């Protein structure tokens, strides 16, 4: 599963750094191309030459040592990677990464990458169990970083307990299993809608909502990770396009309606997470509407219901809707699931603080047409996206 994968291996300053040499060898034997970044601390235990000899690739140690003047080293390396793994990951590195600190080659590259990131901690048992370290690990996992648990055993400090770096062969097996599961949607065509839509009132004003597009973009990113061919129809948002995703930008609900229906017949899965404007101005002024001395009314009319239209037209597509509610979320979600002929609906209560519109986190209830319910407590939108897509893959496999 790692054949032809491009892997960046970050090695930090712990005695377990010697195992990273064996890990580089095993990843290379598995068919991966491995490029290594060593921190200053790591170089106290191991040398760049050791990794270079095994990987047959340049080894990076200094942010400012630009090997190719035509490229920005840490950005180029972060874009190159299919996956990023830190082994061993010290408490120091975990703390810096969790808090967005970029003060060396490894941390600047980590913050620049959009590839899946795996961390394999190694440290003293008491250090590993310290609340600060655990909070930092929890924060990273909520952002979608995946943890390779340390083993229990005899540690270099003389203690016995949890904190020993996972063995290189176990790390390779873990990564292979992840890549295998990440291909659950290989070859599937998935269409995702994201963000708000804007309905013009006059040349300077429009109707819209608070949607940031983050949930839909997370779904698109996770789907691409799982091997799907992803088309992302995005309203006006300021978000980077996920890797390996075909993005179509739209403005109005009508624009989104046309783009979605054009691609709908060729899709296996459609996930409509966009928060479209339900209404539009009946008449759009060609010139700016001047301030009135008294009250002013704008007559609005209903937009087309994209999701309901798809529910009527679907053949064998798996159709998923999203519902942002503030009260009776399950009841309203169930009604939409039935009314719009969906296979699943994802509901969240946007009245709760720290989740929903504009947030990196969410808390959702997934209802499926067969009656299954899945509650996902507050976590990152990317983690929710992966769980949703894994469930969809499971349902599609059961139908085959």
Image (cartoon, helix red, strand yellow):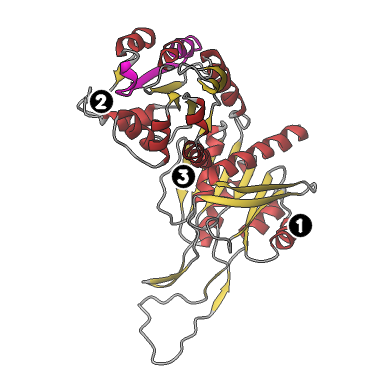
- Horizontal side, residue 53 vs residue 117: left or right: left
Relative to 267, does residue 400 appear above or below in the rendering?
above
> Which of 382 and 90 lies nearest the eye of the viewer?
90
- Horizontal side, residue 310 vs residue 161: left or right: right
> Which of 315 and 178 lies nearest the eye of the viewer?
178
Q: Are marks 3 and 1 in contact (CB under 8 Å)?
A: no
Q: Quadrant of the N terminus?
A: top right
> Which of 121 and 270 lies nearest the eye of the viewer?
121
Identify the element where label 3 is drawn. strand
Taking the spot 43% from the left edge, 13% from the top edge, the residue there is 24
Q: Which residues are magenta?
A: 23-44
- Which tag is nearer the camera, tag 3 or tag 1? 1
The image's mark for residue 338 is 1
Identify the element where label 2 is drawn. loop
Cα distance between the residues tagged 2 and 1? 57 Å
Q: Residues within 10 Å of mark 2 (few under 14, many from 20)?
A: some
Cα distance between the residues tagged 3 and 1? 30 Å
Identify the element where label 1 is drawn. helix
Read off the residue under disc 2. Answer: 62
Instruction: Specify whether residue 1 is in view.
Output: no
Percent across and percent down for residue 7 are 43, 22
Ranked by sequence position, the earlier of labels 3 and 1 is 3
Q: Are marks 3 and 2 in contact (CB under 8 Å)?
A: no
Read off the residue under disc 3. Answer: 247
- Which tag is nearer the camera, tag 2 or tag 1? 2
Cα distance between the residues tagged 3 and 2? 35 Å
């Amino acid at each position: 599963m790692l054949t032809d994968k491009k892997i960046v291996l970050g090695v930090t300053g712990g005695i377990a750094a010697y195992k990273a040499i064996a890990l580089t060898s095993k990843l290379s034997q598995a068919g991966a191309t491995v490029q290594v970044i060593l921190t200053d601390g790591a170089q106290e235990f191991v040398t760049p030459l050791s990794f270079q000899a095994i990987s047959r690739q340049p080894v990076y140690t200094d942010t400012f040592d630009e090997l190719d003047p035509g490229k920005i080293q840490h950005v180029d390396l972060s874009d190159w990677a299919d996956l990023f793994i830190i082994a061993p990951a010290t408490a120091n590195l975990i703390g810096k990464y969790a808090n967005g600190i970029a003060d060396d080659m490894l941390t600047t590259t980590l913050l620049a990458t959009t590839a899946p990131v795996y961390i394999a901690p190694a440290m003293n048992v008491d250090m590993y169990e310290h609340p600060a370290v655990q909070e930092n690990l929890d924060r990273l996992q909520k952002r979608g970083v995946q943890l390779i648990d340390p083993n229990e055993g005899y540690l270099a400090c003389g203690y016995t307990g949890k904190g020993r770096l996972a063995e290189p062969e176990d790390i390779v097996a873990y990564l292979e299993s992840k890549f295998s599961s990440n291909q659950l949607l290989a070859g599937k065509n998935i269409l995702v809608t994201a963000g708000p839509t804007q309905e013009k009132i006059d040349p300077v004003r429009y109707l819209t909502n608070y949607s940031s597009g983050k949930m839909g973009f997370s779904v698109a990113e996770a789907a691409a990770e799982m091997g799907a061919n992803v088309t992302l129809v995005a309203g006006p948002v300021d978000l980077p396009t996920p890797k390996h995703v075909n993005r179509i930008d739209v403005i109005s609900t009508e624009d989104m309606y046309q783009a979605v229906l054009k691609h709908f017949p060729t899709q296996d899965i459609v996930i409509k997470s966009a928060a479209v404007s339900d209404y539009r101005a009946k008449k759009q002024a060609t010139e700016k509407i001047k301030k009135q001395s008294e009250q002013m009314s704008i007559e609005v009319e209903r937009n087309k219901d994209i999701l309901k239209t798809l529910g009527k037209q679907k053949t064998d597509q798996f159709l998923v809707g999203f519902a942002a509610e503030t009260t009776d979320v399950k009841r309203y979600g169930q009604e939409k699931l039935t009314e719009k002929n969906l296979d699943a609906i994802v509901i969240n209560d946007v009245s709760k603080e720290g989740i929903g519109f504009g947030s990196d986190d969410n808390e959702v209830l997934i209802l499926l047409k067969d009656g299954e319910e899945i509650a996902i407590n507050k976590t990152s939108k990317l983690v929710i996206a992966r769980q949703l897509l894994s469930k969809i893959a499971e349902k599609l496999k059961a139908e085959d």
